[in-house]
Image: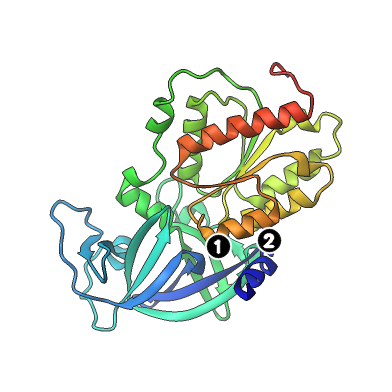
């Protein structure tokens, strides 16, 4: 009970705990919520035809875990493994993956408002692999987008539009949906999947702050509920995270009627407690795009019925 109370008290504060680690002398970070455990590096069995960044697999207990060589992924060069290397065992998107790093440098708690998205000049193509850059004491820490790293290495583990295609023909829907998602890659995947599911009125924002500014600007409009019928939000975003966005929406007298879906790689039992306490209507793990479409249908029908809105509106 004490642990649950602590979780609830921390909900919606727009803060993140970052585990800092080093690779070739540079500081990087991972959201502590993604970390299952830290282990000393172990012998890894190579796998034929694997992605160059995949070191292989190991079996610490009864579970086979894929190991990604983060040094090679980030730098594109092979570096001799050290005897003090560590494995960060992660759990997100309902997967367990190990990442080899060279040292762990501690944990820092900071506000998302102090995390900035890197300039596009630092990115590979449309975007890089950084969720943001954080100032932790005297150090600039690059918070890596582990979800994007895994999606790049193993695309089949990410959002699959085929799940929507298997649902067959669906009617077009002009209900306005607001989406807060900082990853360009994942935002495109979500947009593509929802468009194929018939949702034609999608408004995207790069983070919770932008989405909240938009909702705040229209909250007093007489036709508010014709401008937004549902909000879909990620959790991890610079400036304002999805938990804070959900909290602000559900504490507002006008906006709280609008259904909010948290769609994140971080959904687990503890995160469900947080989201429920904040008032989220549904919480889904990110690969489940087919399930997302079904939930959107259900929440839209309920919302529009409660507001006395016809299908054509």
Task: From this view, report whether residue 75 is shown above or below residue 267.
Answer: below
Task: From this view, report whether residue 111 is shown above or below residue 162.
Answer: below
Residue 106 screen position, x and y as percent: 48, 81
Marking on residue 12: 2
Residue at figure coordinates x 68%, y 57% from the top left? 277
Looking at this view, is 117 or 245 the one in front?
245
Of mark 2 and mark 1, the one earlier in the sequence is: 2
Can residue 238 be seen by looking at this rendering? no
Residue at figure coordinates x 19%, y 69% from the top left? 44
Quarter that holds the C terminus: top right
Asked whether the beta carbons under mark 2 and mark 1 sit within 8 Å of each other, the answer is no
Q: How are the residues colored? A: rainbow
Residue at mark 2 to residue at mark 1: CA–CA distance: 14 Å
Of tags 2 and 1, the one toward the viewer is 1
Residue at figure coordinates x 46%, y 49% from the top left? 127
Q: Please tell me whether mark 1 sits on a helix, a strand or a loop.
A: helix
Residue at figure coordinates x 56%, y 71% from the top left? 17
Looking at this view, is 144 or 198 the one in front?
198
Tell me the quarter of the picture where residue 254 sits: top right
Furthest toward the front, the residue is 1
Looking at this view, is 219 or 123 the one in front?
219
Other-residue count near label 1 (Cα within 10 Å), few / some / many at <14 / 14–19 / ≥20: some
Can residue 200 be seen by looking at this rendering? yes
Marking on residue 270: 1
Residue 51 shown left or right of residue 118 in the figure? left
């Amino acid at each position: 009970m004490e642990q649950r109370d602590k979780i609830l008290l921390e909900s919606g504060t727009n803060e993140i705990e970052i585990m800092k680690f080093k690779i070739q002398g540079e500081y990087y970070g991972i959201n502590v919520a993604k970390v299952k455990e830290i282990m000393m590096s172990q012998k890894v069995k190579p796998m034929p035809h694997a992605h160059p960044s995949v070191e292989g697999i190991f079996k610490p207990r009864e579970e086979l875990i894929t190991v990604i060589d983060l040094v090679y992924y980030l730098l594109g060069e092979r570096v001799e493994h050290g005897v003090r290397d560590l494995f960060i065992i992660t759990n997100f998107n309902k997967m367990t993956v190990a990442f080899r790093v060279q040292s762990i440098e501690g944990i820092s708690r900071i506000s998302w408002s102090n995390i900035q998205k890197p300039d596009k000049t630092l990115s590979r193509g449309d975007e890089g692999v950084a969720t943001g850059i954080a100032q932790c004491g005297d150090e600039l820490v690059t918070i890596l987008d582990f979800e994007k790293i895994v999606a790049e290495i193993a695309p089949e583990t990410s959002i699959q539009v085929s799940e929507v295609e298997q649902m067959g023909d669906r009617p077009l829907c002009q209900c306005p949906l607001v989406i807060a998602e900082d990853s360009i890659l994942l935002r495109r995947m979500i947009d593509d999947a929802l468009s194929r599911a018939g949702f034609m009125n999608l408004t995207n924002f790069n983070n919770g702050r932008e989405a909240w500014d938009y909702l705040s600007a229209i909250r007093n409009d007489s036709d508010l509920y014709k401008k937004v019928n549902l909000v879909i939000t990620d959790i991890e975003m610079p400036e304002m995270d999805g938990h804070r966005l959900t909290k602000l929406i559900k504490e507002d007298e006008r906006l709280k009627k609008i259904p909010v879906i948290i769609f994140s790689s971080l959904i687990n039992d503890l995160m469900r407690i947080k989201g429920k306490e904040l008032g989220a209507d549904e919480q889904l793990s990110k690969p489940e795009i087919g399930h997302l479409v079904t939930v959107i249908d259900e929440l839209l029908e309920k919302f529009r019925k409660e507001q006395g809105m016809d299908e054509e509106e």
